[in-house]
Image: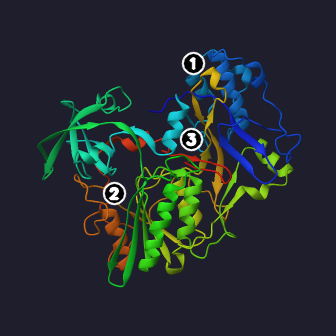
Amino acid sequence: MKKVFGWRPALLAVASSAFLLTACKDPQVDPSSPGTGNATAANPYDRNFQGTVTDANLNRWILDSMQVYYYWNDKLPDASTLNFDQQPNLFFESLLYRYNRQTRPDGDRFSFMYDNAQDLKNSLSGIARTTGMEFRLNLYPSGTDNVIGRVLYVLPNSPAARAGVKRGDIFNKIDGQTLTRANYATLLDVSQNIDTRTYTFVTATNGQLSTGQDKRIQAIQLAEDPVLLDTTFTVGSKKIGYLVYNQFITGPGGPTDRTYDQKIDNAFARFKGAGINELVVDLRYNPGGYVSSALNLASLIGKGVDNSKVFYRQEYNKLIMDQFNRAGQAGGLSSRFSNKSQNVGANLQRVFVLTSDATASASELLINGLKPYMDVQVIGDTTVGKNVGSITIEDRYAARKVKLGLQPIVTKSFNSLGQSDYSGGFVPNAVVFETNLVLPQLGDIANEPLLRTAVGRITGTVNGRLGVGTQREMPSVGSSLDDKAAGGNMFFDAPNGLFK
């Protein structure tokens, strides 16, 4: 679960050939001698903070980090006005240049803290305590406070999968208690010290729920493989590649592990071998991830792209940008596509991206970065609208035993045309919602509304702005996707950066 607490260190150094923003390193900023390798001006708290973990010391660390890295560091309150003796979560919140539709439309919607930095890093790599099923919570029946869980997808070989749970299943009780608006958060909190719960699954017939089956499901620490499905369909003369990708994760071992990126490469090798001439990328449940994984996927899709073409450019606060400029490294703020032998762009005129209101960050970076090179058709719901990214900051002194993790926004992203105008989200070319009480299976081109709309537009049988399932679903009270650390975030890893 997310907690608003925080700590410090990450590396900020201008090296001879690359600017690095990574976790678990010393904070290093040397405005006086950029471009000199590791020459740095040490932070005074590195010398003076001797391990007394008080709120005041924690809060000074938080402020110090934000003054260096925060994208809106010029909007931080004057230190003389701050209460350093308050709880760190309240102190952190008091620093943020928070978004307000009327007064701060350019404000921060995404900075947060975790109470455990290792949990944060695990979650960024798709590792979390889970049953293996992701679900959306809705009020049902209409006019009541009763809550049901509709299963969105189930991870293969997870406890939920072994219990026989599948997409489209519906549950309405936990340990015999009916889910309501008042109790669902507590009953579904898998972070509590309860290994196994009983979920009551019900059957839906003509909109009516009938008595179902109890299933005992354990929550375990699990690494999610984000590549849920890749397949091809042949519809007339159209050979359609279809990819369901649920998080931009490089691999279970963190940003240096490319296991999942390689799996994406292999999927596109199969697409290319099958001779696809249309592509549908399903990002409806993808809240973001590593920029390096977004760049990898974009390099497999883009038409006419290679390592001379810009995928995205990043902008930091004035302190950091000045250091780049003095070092003559401002050109290093642009990340270029990779040359990929599995690229299918030569056979495509367009790409279809399926979205929801949970589609965010690196998913949006992909859409924005591809738009200068090809027609990107968005089908589904308006996306979150996150055109900014963050880094993970944690304490580097293990002896102090401070476990908190800070995730501040540090950068804004632009495509090769200098466009970053999607803070309100990408509005779909075809508006389609998952309106079915019982969700059709992913990959069902006849019944699943988002994919059916994409296929219809490919074959010319669905035209105009609206597709099918255009009435918004029953009232939602949340989703298990909200608990992913990647939710609505972009992250940077060295050397090219990472967005989640």
Residue type for callout 2: Phe
Residue 234, horizontal then vertical, whole percent:
33, 78
Residue 496 visible, this orientation = yes
Residue 398, horizontal then vertical, whole percent:
63, 26
Label ID, residue 433: 2
Mark 3: give few (<14), some (14-19) or many (20+) Cα within 10 Å: few
How far apart are the two marked residues, 3 and 1, measured between alpha carbons? 29 Å
Q: Give whichever of 455, 191 is nearer the camera.
A: 191
**Residue 330, relative to residue 405: is it above or below?**
below
Residue 101, horizontal then vertical, whole percent:
54, 42
**Which-is-in-front pick, marks 3 and 2?**
2
User: Which quarter of the rendered picture does the N terminus lie within?
Assistant: top left
Q: Callout 3: helix, strand or loop?
A: loop
Q: Give whichever of 9, 321 is nearer the camera.
A: 9
Residue 416, horizontal then vertical, whole percent:
66, 65
450 displayed left or right of 210 = right
The reply to whether the C-beta atoms of the residues labelled 3 and 1 are less than 8 Å apart is no
Label ID, residue 87: 1
Q: Which residue is mark 3?
A: 102
Q: Callout 2: helix, strand or loop?
A: loop
The reply to whether the C-beta atoms of the residues labelled 2 and 1 are less than 8 Å apart is no
Residue 180 visible, this orientation = no
**Which-is-in-front pick, marks 3 and 1?**
1
**Residue 496, relative to residue 128: is it above or below?**
below
Q: Callout 1: helix, strand or loop?
A: loop
Residue type for callout 3: Gln
Which residue is rendered at x = 25% and y = 51% of the image? Answer: 166
Q: Earlier in the sequence, mark 2 or mark 1?
A: 1
Which residue is rendered at x = 53% and y = 56% of the image? Answer: 364
How far apart are the two marked residues, 2 and 1, measured between alpha carbons? 41 Å
Residue type for callout 1: Gln
